[in-house]
Amino acid sequence: MAWAGNRPLSGTQVMPRLVVGVTGGIGSGKSTVCSAFAALGVPFVDADIVAREVVEPGQPALEEIRREFGSSVFLDHETLDRSALRTQVFADATAKTRLENIIHPRVRDRIHDAISNCTADYMLVCIPLLLESGAYQDIIDRVLVIDCSEETQIKRVIVRSGLTRSEVEAIMRAQKSRAERLAAADDVLLNEGDLRDITARVGELHQKYQALAATD
Ligand code: ATP
């Protein structure tokens, strides 16, 4: 694969011409918005899904996790016991870093691969902790922040996950604040309305990104 800077070179063109990083706080609506883009035919890769794929049975990350954390975080030889692993990681900050050192480079490599295999003019990369991680600046051209009030985030996550308000608030405290995210945004999609509002706003952004990709 030939590359131009950080981008794969397809024929004489750098493809995709535009990579949009989608981010937002927990429950802001990132997946919902990405699905609306996908309905328009826009390819996207979701870092949360990739993070689950790299620890599926047979993946090399599993052996590293076994070496670091032992067999007690496995249900059987092939299957990770996510809840046991979560317990270890919550109890020990160094364990969290060790786990991230195994998972994150693999997620990043797969996202890189997804970009290099993309033949569309533009694509989306959904990374919940895009701004927190700092590991994606070189592959992202624009940041699209999915925004809503903190109260809306809390209500959505409680309904979806059954977590308590204080559990959701603790997760939110570990993420960038709403103001910090908005300050880093190139584009903002305010997701306080209904699905029709999302479809309309996604349609506008789609036109904008197509135009940007055509002129980049
Ligand atoms: P997470 O960070 O937790 O992965 P997310 O940012 O991807 O979440 P979604 O999963 O898209 O957010 O949305 C969170 C919940 O809120 C889902 O149950 C979704 O159906 C709901 N939701 C999202 N947007 C809206 C909306 N505009 N109106 C009503 N419900 C919504």
Image (cartoon, helix red, strand yellow):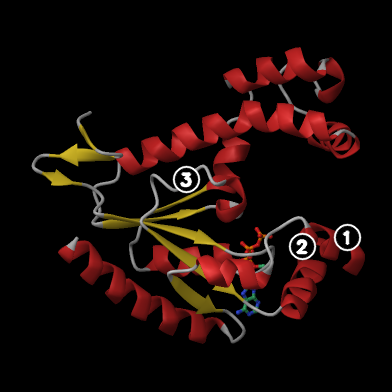
Residue 54, located in which quarter of the rendered image?
top right
Tell me the SS state at disc 1.
Answer: helix
Of the residues shown, which amino acid type is indicated by label 2?
Answer: Met
Of the residues shown, which amino acid type is indicated by label 3?
Answer: Tyr
Structural crowding at the residue carrying mark 1, measured as other residues with C-alpha within 10 Å and reported as few (<14), some (14–19) or many (≥20): some
**Figure quadrant of the C terminus:** bottom left
Task: Kindly identify which residue carries mark 3.
Answer: 136
**Figure quadrant of the N terminus:** top left
Residue 149 to residue 47: above or below: below
Query: Which residue is pictured at 26% across the width and 50% down the height?
Result: 16
Task: Kindly identify which residue carries mark 1.
Answer: 167
Locate ligand 1 by image quadrant. bottom right
Earlier residue among tags 2 and 3 = 3
Task: Kindly identify which residue carries mark 2.
Answer: 172
Query: Which residue is pictured at 28% across the width and 75% down the height?
Result: 207
Q: Is residue 57 left or right of residue 187?
A: right
Earlier residue among tags 3 and 1 = 3
11 or 72: which is nearer to us? 11
Instruction: Give residue 98's position: percent from left, percent from top.
Output: 72, 26
Instruction: Give residue 153's position: percent from left, percent from top.
Output: 73, 73
Count the marks: how many? 3
Tell me the SS state at disc 2.
Answer: helix
Tell me the SS state at disc 3.
Answer: loop
Structural crowding at the residue carrying mark 2, measured as other residues with C-alpha within 10 Å and reported as few (<14), some (14–19) or many (≥20): some
Q: Is mark 1 within 8 Å of ligand 1?
A: no
Q: Is residue 56 visible?
A: no
Of the residues shown, which amino acid type is indicated by label 1?
Answer: Glu
Q: Is residue 18 visible?
A: yes
Residue 199, located in which quarter of the rendered image?
bottom left
